Amino acid sequence: MKPITIETITLHAIALPFVEPLRTSFGEEPFKSAILVELKTTDGVTGWGEVSTEIHPGYSSETMGTAAHVLPEFLLPLVHGKTVASPTEIPQLIASVRGHLMAKHGLEAAAWDAWAKTNGIGLAEAFAAHLPEDHSPRGYGTVGVSIGIKPSVEATCAVIQKRIDQGYRRIKLKIAPGWDVELARGVRERFPDITLMLDANSAYTLADADLLKQLDAFNLLMIEQPLAYDDIYEHRKLQPQLKTPICLDESILSADDARMALELGACKIINLKPARVGGYTESLEIYKVCVEHGAPLWIGGMMETGVGRAANLAFASLPGVTLPCDISATDRYFDPDVTEPPFVIRPDSTIPVAAGEGIGVQVIGGRLHAAEHLWHVQYPYKTS
Ligand code: OSB
Ligand code: MG
């Protein structure tokens, strides 16, 4: 495999209107925000990565503001002019910066795309090149859809029906205190057979164990992140009280966290968001931990643009990703996205990995500029 030498990196802060925003237990973002990382190598190859930070420090402590500060000030100088034989060398180059995992992820992702393109392979093959031979990519990801908090159970059921009609075979509903047991009961009555799961985004405490136990009645695939965003210990106390498997999202920032959570019994399933754990190098380590433990694994999402979604879908095509992923079709998120071609859901709830080298989708210049303009109109003080 050929190495890459990083010549220039350009950051694009963008805002994109959502087709349907996602209300969670911590609120709703006004539009999709991200910093797209454009990396050029000395061979003239361009790689793209997505820093999928939000405006508010609700899901993550990182924001558009922290990423716009840390990338140019601290991270980019550490990689400028550097040659790497593989993108898996990027984390050690930037290890002197603590935290800022989403910013690091976007930078590393751009290097993955450039490296795969330099070597004439798709991103899924690039990931598989760092795994044992029996982990060849499948060419598609099995996916579901995440539905936000709606004004009523009726309104939620209408969206579920629309998503089922589009081909989604796994439905995830956001919950919050007061929007949980009655929601699950109402949806189950209306849809007795769908694969259903809930995501609490850390809205409960151990004192709510009796309420959470009531959710066992609804045959849920899992409940995601019921307790605190930085907790493993109390999830370990909750899991034995529930029949429903707990899946950890916010609490898992590294392969060490995943190992600890699985071995302690704090969860039975891992949600792997490459953005949350600092990139695909750490994601590959988490993947290996899950394979080793026989733990079900799926890829979560940050409502990514086509840049981030293409790479996550490539990762989701690896055979150790065993459950449907939060990677939906383009028309669930944006009209239009900043990339072409769009991702389209098939009737069996799969999305094919984009064909071609690297991420396999093209960034459309005019749409990128429009999205940059919208960001600067909304948040002129955040980036230059
Ligand atoms: O908890 O999974 C989450 C989006 C923003 C912040 C947190 C979460 C989400 C999603 C997005 O659920 C799902 C998607 O990208 O389709
Ligand atoms: Mg989640």
Image (cartoon, grey):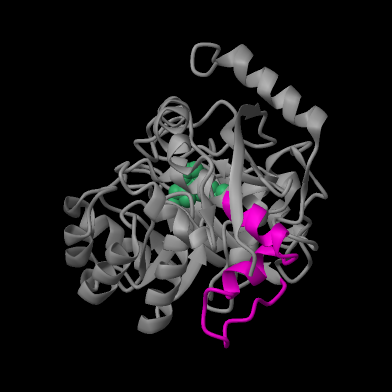
Q: Is residue 148 above or below residue 88?
A: above
Q: Residue drawn at (24%, 69%), measured in percent from left and top?
A: 260
Q: Quadrant of the C terminus?
A: top right
Q: Position of residue 70 (x, y in %)?
A: 40, 31
Magenta span of residues: 111-139
Q: Is residue 162 above or below residue 291?
A: above
Quarter residue 119 falls in: bottom right
Q: Residue 142 lies in what quarter of the image?
A: bottom right
Q: Is residue 112 magenta?
A: yes
Residue 166 as seen in the image, left or right of residue 33: right
Is 100 on the left-hand or right-hand side of 9? left
Question: Quick check: can you spot residue 191?
Answer: no
Name the residue at the bottom extreme. 134
**Pick the front one: 99 or 260:** 99
Q: Quadrant of the N terminus?
A: bottom right
As for residue 364 lying within the magenta part, the answer is: no
Q: Is residue 226 left or right of residue 339?
A: left
Q: Position of residue 71 (x, y in %)?
A: 46, 33
Compared to 251, does 350 lie above or below? below
The residue positioned 38% from the left and 43% from the top of the image is 176
Coordinates of residue 366 in the picture (x, y in percent): 81, 28
Q: Nearer the viewer, residue 203 or 121?
A: 121
- Does 336 appear above or below 1? above
Count of marks overlaid on the render: 0
Residue 124, image x, y percentages: 65, 68
The reply to whether residue 320 is visible in this rendering is: yes
